[in-house]
Amino acid sequence: MPLVSINIANRTYELACGEGEEARVQELAAYVDEKVTDLRKQMPGAAEIKLVVFAALLLADESREARGIARQAETARASASDSADTLATALEELITSRVDKMSKKVSGAA
């Protein structure tokens, strides 16, 4: 397993990760560190652990909100798909009805 070196809250950590995941782990660590840095500006003098805990809570909140948005999008997609199916069925029935009427007119005229 490859080792990756990350920096969060002015501390360096060596972590094992999956093959080819090094860049992703570093990207995620940079995002966490960015949150800690932003919090440090808002809460000068706060203990590093407190900043890291707040950053974790903010990230958990972002994650939960994103999952909620994804669920809403999936529900909307499913609803649109159901509506499209209903419309297609209605159009098919209308066309069939029109063709039947036209067939009867042609048969009656012959």
Image: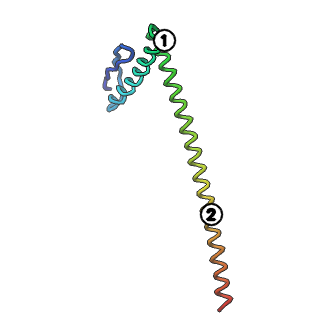
- Give residue 106's position: percent from left, percent from top: 64, 86
Judging by the rendered image, the residue that carries numbered circle 1 is 50
Is 105 placed left or right of 37 in the picture?
right
Q: Looking at this rendering, what residue extends furthest in the bottom direction?
A: 110
Q: Is residue 70 above or below residue 33?
A: below
Disc 2/disc 1 C-alpha distance (Å): 58 Å
For the point 53% across and 26% down, the residue is: 61
Q: Amino acid at mark 1?
A: Lys
Judging by the rendered image, the residue that carries numbered circle 2 is 89
Scheme of colours in the image: rainbow
Quadrant in the picture for residue 11: top left
User: 25 or 16: nearer the eye?
Assistant: 25
Q: Quadrant of the C terminus?
A: bottom right
For the point 32% across and 26% down, the residue is: 1
User: 14 or 7: nearer the eye?
Assistant: 7
- Give residue 59's position: percent from left, percent from top: 49, 25
Q: Amino acid at mark 2?
A: Thr
Q: Is residue 87 above or below residue 26?
A: below
- Give residue 4's position: percent from left, percent from top: 32, 23
Q: Is residue 90 above or below residue 38?
A: below
Give neighbour class at mark 2: few <14, some 14-19, many 20+ (Cα, 10 Å).
Answer: few
Q: Is residue 73 above or below residue 38?
A: below
For the point 35% across and 18% down, the residue is: 7
Quadrant in the picture for residue 97: bottom right
Quadrant in the picture for residue 30: top left
